[in-house]
Amino acid sequence: MTRVRFAAAAALSLALSSPALATPPLPEAWQSTLNRDNPLVGKIWSVGKQAFVTPEALAGDIASARFVLAGETHDNADHHLRQAWIVSALTEAGRKPAVVFEMISADEAGALKSYLAGTPKNASAMGKALKWKERGWPDWAMYQPIADAALAAGLPMAPGDLSRETVKRFRKEGLGALGKGIAESWGLETPLPAAGQETLKQDLRDGHCGLLPEPAVEAMVPVQRARDASFADGLIANATADGAVLIAGRGHVRGDMAVPWYLRARAPEASIRIVAMVEAEQGQSDPADYLPAPGVYDYLWFTPKAERPDKCEELKARFGKKS
């Protein structure tokens, strides 16, 4: 996109945006430090309208959807603050959706229920109750604003992921690890489109920095598909009259192969909105550069990039020790 077209799209954004709603205040300061000077930072790009929209317009649109999928980069605190904003914006619009978390597996369902039964005033101790740190997720303080927003509005919260035992059993049992009839009811016996299948494989390769042998990639595909189907089931099973929100990694909310694919198969009448939190990269100021494929997301919400160690170097060191 040329600069002229980019500017024109920005100028038209108000005219093209959805009906605005009163919304909660946005976070006052960025938590992440890299690429704050990228002109995209803080802006929301509507993929369908090919224009920037205001937070109020975004709130107006997602308030009409049964399922809202908010995709993140796990260790970016700004992404979680905007996920919390989405939850609050929905409640201010009069919605009371359930909030389903990728990060909470079926193993923690009892602990989550017990914690919520204590009617906590905030979620400060929720991470400890769910063994958040022990299970390897980024600092609970990053995720707490989402849970606090849900608690403040009295929204139900629910796990989305498979149990650890189920994932282990996949090695021997494949889809049978889910239990009788589950794979069929979740849509897992229907193959992904060829492009989606290959994209999923490439994501697994890239996510492991090209270090996995191809048989290992092939073995991980059904597990990854089952996790996406589990998240979709969590949304359907826990949805209130006002639907549900998913908090998950950005790859899990891709419309072409992940959670939305299973939702459309099982609930074709349900409206879905996909909001992807995206880290702005140095020298990339065209929103089109951040779309991996057409129809993957409905909105891109740009933030600075979080500082992090080189994951591939860490993986290389880990694989080297194992070898």
Image (spheres, rainbow, N blue to C red):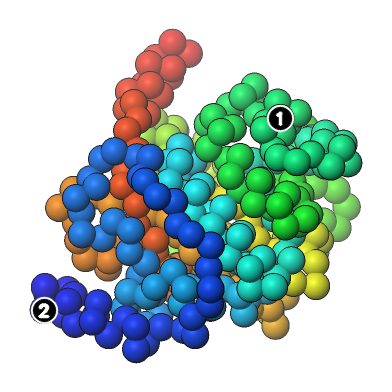
Mark 2 vs mark 1: give the one in front: 1
- Mark 1 lies on a secondary structure that is loop
CA gap, disc 2 and disc 1 = 50 Å
Q: Amino acid at mark 1?
A: Ala
93 shown above or below 165: below
> Closer to the camera, 128 or 214?
128
50 shown above or below 164: below
Residue 143 picture location, percent across and down: 58, 40
Q: Amino acid at mark 2?
A: Val
Taking 305 as reference, is 189 left or right? Answer: right
Q: Tell me the crowding category of disc 2: few under 14, some 14 to 19, or many 20 or more residues within 10 angstroms, Cα based.
A: few
Residue 278 picture location, percent across and down: 37, 54
Name the residue beneath numbered marker 1: 125
Query: Image point 29% across, 38% down: which residue?
Result: 33
Q: What is the residue that sits farthest to the bottom in this orientation?
A: 15
Q: Which mark is residue 4?
A: 2
